[in-house]
Amino acid sequence: MASVLLVEDDPVVRAAVMRALTGQGHIVHGVALAIEALREVTVHEYDVVVLDLGLPDLDGGDALRMIRGVTNTPVVIATARDDEGEIVRLLNAGADDYLVKPFSSEHLGARLQAVLRRARDSKQLVIGGLEIDVTLRRAAVDGTELSLTHKEFELLSFLAARQGEVVPRAEILASLWPSHRDDQTLDVHLSWLRRKLGERAAQPRYLHTVRGVGVRLVAPQ
C-alpha cells in the first residue's frame, strides 16, 4: 500500500484512476491543478506522484521542475504526449517513469510498484559527518538535513556510492545527464552542492575536483 498523489485535470479520468488505484490497496488523493499539487507535496509526504502534463494552470513539465525543487518523492508522468524527445527531456528533468495514455490500471499499478520497489531497495551511506538515506532520498551533514533538488541528490549519492574514487566527469555526465553532455551543467550542480555542504571549491571538505579528470568524494580530514 502506498500514498499516491494523482494530478489529473480530467474529472472522469481522475475518478477512474483513483478508483482503480484504491482498489489495488493504495491511498489516493486527487487534484486537478499544478498549484494544488505543489501545495500538497509541500505540506504532506506522499510515496509517489502521478502527474499529467496537460494541466490548465501550468504545463506539467514546469510543474515537475517545481516539485523537484521541494521534494524527492518519485514522480511518474502519465500523459497522452508520446514524443520521444519530450520523454527523454522529462526523465532527465527528474521524472522516475513515463506512461503514455491510454494505459490500463494494471499497467499503471505495475509501474508504481516498480518505482516504489526501486526506492525501497536502496541503502544508507555514511561518510564522515555526511549521512545519505537513498531509500528516503534524504541527506544530512553534521546532523543538519540538506535541502537538495532531485539532481543535486542524484549527484551526491552517485559520488558517495563511489567514495574515495576519482569518478571521471564523462562518466558522471553519461549517468546523470545522458542526453546533455555540457560540462558546465556538472560544474553548476557541483557549485550548488558545495554551497549546501558548507564548503568552497578552493577549500573543499567532501567534494574534491581532480583537474582534467573528475571528482572525488571523501570524508574530511
Image (cartoon, grey):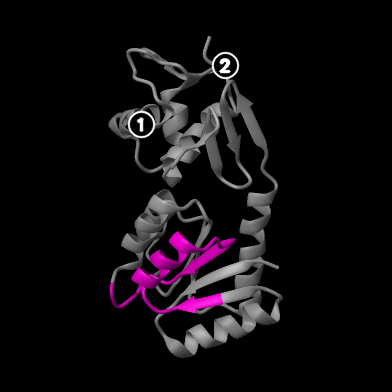
Q: Residue at x 63, y 77 (%)?
A: 21
Q: Mark yes or no: residue 163 visible.
A: yes
> What residue sits right under mark 2 in the picture?
164
With respect to residue 136, does 30 lie above or below?
Answer: below
User: What mark, if any, has residue 47 been given in the picture?
Assistant: none
Badge 1, how many Cα within 10 Å: few under 14, some, many 20+?
Answer: many
With respect to residue 125, does 25 lie above or below?
Answer: below
Q: Say what secondary structure mark 2 lies in.
A: loop
Q: Is residue 128 magenta?
A: no
Indicate the position of residue 125 as horizontal and vertical percent values. Answer: 63, 31
With respect to residue 29, does 73 lie above or below?
Answer: above
Say what amino acid the circle numbered 2 marks: Gly
User: What mark, if any, has residue 186 been given in the picture?
Assistant: 1
Indicate the position of residue 54 as horizontal and vertical percent values. Answer: 34, 74
Q: Residue at x 41, y 85 (%)?
A: 10
Q: Residue at x 44, y 60 (%)?
A: 42
- Give the Cα separation between the discs numbered 1 and 2: 19 Å
Q: Which residues are magenta?
A: 29-57
- Most distant residue in the top direction: 221
